[in-house]
Amino acid sequence: MTDAVDVNSADSWPDDADDVAEGYLANWFVREGSAVDEGETLCEIQVEKVSIDVTAPTAGTVTETLVGEGDDFARGDVLARVQPSA
Amino acid sequence: MVSVTDLRTMYEQMVTARHYEERLVDEYLVGKQPAFDISAGPIPGELHLAAGHEASGAGVCIHLRDDDTVTAPHRPHHIAIAKGVDLKRMTAEIFGRKTGLCRGKGGHMHLFDPDVNFACSGIIAQGCPPAVGAAMAAKKRNTDAVAVAFLGEGAIDQGGFLESLNLAAVHDLPVVFVVEDNDWAISMPKDRVTDVQNGAQRADGFDMPGVRIDSDDAMAVYEAAGEAVMRARDGNGPTLIEVQVHRRMGHFMGDAEGYRPEADIDRAKQRDSIERLAEDLRSHGVTDDELDEIRERAHERVEEVISWAKEQPEPDPEEAYENVFTNPPAQAATDGGAAADAPGDAGETGGDN
Amino acid sequence: MATESRDYTEATETDRELTMSRAMVEAIAWEMRENEEVFYMGEDVADYGGIFSSTTGLLDEFGRDRVMDVPISETAYLGAAVGAAQAGMRPIAELMFVDFFGVAMDQIYNNMAKNTYMSGGSFSVPMVLTTAVGGTYNDAGQHSQTLYGTFAHLPGMKVVVPSTAYDAKGLMHSAIRDDDPVVYMFHKRLMGLGWMPSPPGPKTGVPKEDYTIPFGEADVKRPGDDVTVVTLGLHVHRAMEAAEQLDDDGIDAEVIDLRTLVPLDTETVLDSVRKTGKLLVVDEDYQSFGVTGEIVARAAEGALDDLSAVKRLAIPDVPIPYARSLEDEVNPGTDDIAAAVRELHE
Ligand SMILES: Cc1ncc(C[n+]2csc(CCOP(=O)(O)OP(=O)(O)O)c2C)c(N)n1
Ligand SMILES: [Mg+2]
């Protein structure tokens, strides 16, 4: 079985927010166990009042969500893990 | 010709407004970082700041007396300050306190101060008709008071504005319409919503003088507004003035301005009417020390009103039922319509989470 | 095309959950793809995506011809939507806050709502008027109203008020396909905006395919035997929370979400009242001459013998005040609902 893929917050960081270190998780759209398509929106984060959709890096199953809705996180924190479908 | 005293007064009002709003930003963001929740913190709700609009408020209101009426839109602070609204009670209002101008009922978009005949409407262009009415009252009573309606360039496409121009013109009423053109109505640039880039041309259709001031230069506003106010006071009818101002910030706090080109933001910030007026003052022989002194005085005043406001009590929940009427109907307290069956006093702290 | 109203619990079990705003936009986008005649206009609906995210992403997909920013001229563009609808198109026009209806009420009330009737049915006005409603974030008297009753009172327009993402999508599909003018009132606090957090509840599972929710079918959110709580919009979630609290004390409240005001599902209300005998109506609109009075009147007309006690909670006939302590006082809270149910139960 292949390893689960990390969904890293840094990968979705807006270009013009290089100097910002913290974000806020506004909404989850999937739960642990949800099946997702590649590119499907997993959650919405906010960095400096800008909303960004974080999408699934691969099709598969969400095995873990690591930041709670309404919680702050640091740039580079892993938000979720997706187990690729075979 | 403008006197140095007037220039100094305008400068002081402008730096007061700018610093006041900078401090409001700090206070507004308390409880709203890093996650921005509009209903959190000591100042909840929308907050529209006017940094970059100061020349218009100061350059117009310097010609006004307490008995002249001003109506302001959703972006009112710089106008209120220039009109002489009680800054302590205005600040308490913005903090939602019992001793605020409106006892905590109005908030920042709905400031009312009868002592200087100042009122607001948060609905686009809807301060125009009441300004016309104030002018009508002055004319009927034969006083030489005038009225000024402030609005944004986005508001000149609204029926309430155009109808007001016509009513004021046909009755030769002493009113001045001041359009603050900051190029944007929230995310909509002017050329997306009107084919007429010079808003003062709207006056032509009503056979009324229309003046456009192309730079946010307090001196130029002073000249044009002086003429318009005098014209109104002398009984010669209304004038429309459009002033180019700059929106140095988002439409409201929390606006990430994703729709706005970076270059436009930079451009707005480069043109600072306060700097320009400081130059004018220097050329009139005012020293840097004197300017520093004015700024310090403004800063002290701002700190004073903000700390005063923050010490003020919050309104008691029961006050919500007061002021619906000036003459409350006798049965109101007992008929179940209002206070009798009121929800509330559950002591929630706002928001829904 | 799926047209069945789905079971709420089934909906929540889909893998994907959406906020109300995303669900609403998904329905609009689907209809725009299917039907060239559908277009959206309003202030700040293009690049901004709607102040309350009612149009996020639509500009990118459909371009400026179909997602139109318009001047701040509500009379002109709402009236233009009426004209375009009468010409056979399916416009969606947004009134940014319902509170702004005043500057354009004539187009809404004398044209949009009446032209079908006044023309003896020879004209239809198949448009949707979308608008943001509600308070709880201290925006004061001109930006916090719901005005549910005002719109529902005037004949000729259908009025829908979703309280969940699932309903928001299904009701939007229905609204766009309906041949009559539909006023679609979305509560700001329920949209799932990062900057105005929603209570738990409005975010639900939402199927990816299209589906409709028929107008005039209230949703029994929670069955109960002791007291009927009829409500809509934000207060569905406050009532559900109150019902959970009451459950701990052995009081079994039935919570009904009206979902549409016009048409109104009187039967579901009557069935419930016949069972419980006790009725609480909760509304975020003004109390007098409004939704609460209407529901109580229908209950009295249809089930008077079964009714033993009635109460209503609404904005107590004052404009919405700014300060937090004042707004909290006038807007019925979860505790107010729980207390009212307790009183009825005694
Ligand atoms: C009748 C009405 N429509 C829409 C709004 C929402 N709104 C508030 S401010 C604004 C933009 C106003 O632009 P402008 O008049 O240029 O003033 P600015 O904000 O740029 O100072 C809009 C559309 C409103 N308050 N009233
Ligand atoms: Mg503007």
Image (tube, coloured by chain):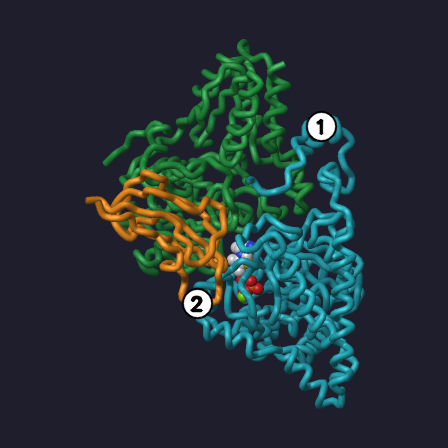
Calculate the distance from the C-alpha at mark 1 to the C-alpha at mark 2. 54 Å
Chain A rendered in what hue? orange
Question: Given the image, on which type of amino acid does mark 1 rest?
Answer: Ala
The image shows residue B252 at horizontal and vertical percentages of: 56, 59
Is A6 situated above or below B270?
above
Quadrant of residue A52 within the rendered picture: bottom left
Does dot 2 land on a helix, a strand or a loop? helix
The image shows residue C52 at horizontal and vertical percentages of: 47, 50
Question: Given the image, on which type of amino acid does mark 2 rest?
Answer: Asp
- In the rendered image, which residue does mark 1 sit on? B340
The residue depicted at 64 percent of the width and 58 percent of the height is B127
Report if residue C87 is visible in the image: no
Q: Quadrant of the C terminus of chain C?
A: top right
How crowded pointer 2 is (Cα within 10 Å; few <14, some 14-19, many 20+) is rated as few
Along the line of sight, the residue nearer the viewer: B159 or C256:
C256
Picture disc at residue A16: 2
Is C62 situated above or below C328?
below
Report if residue C49 is visible in the image: yes
The image shows residue C193 at horizontal and vertical percentages of: 47, 48
Chain letter for the residue marked with disc 2 in the picture? A
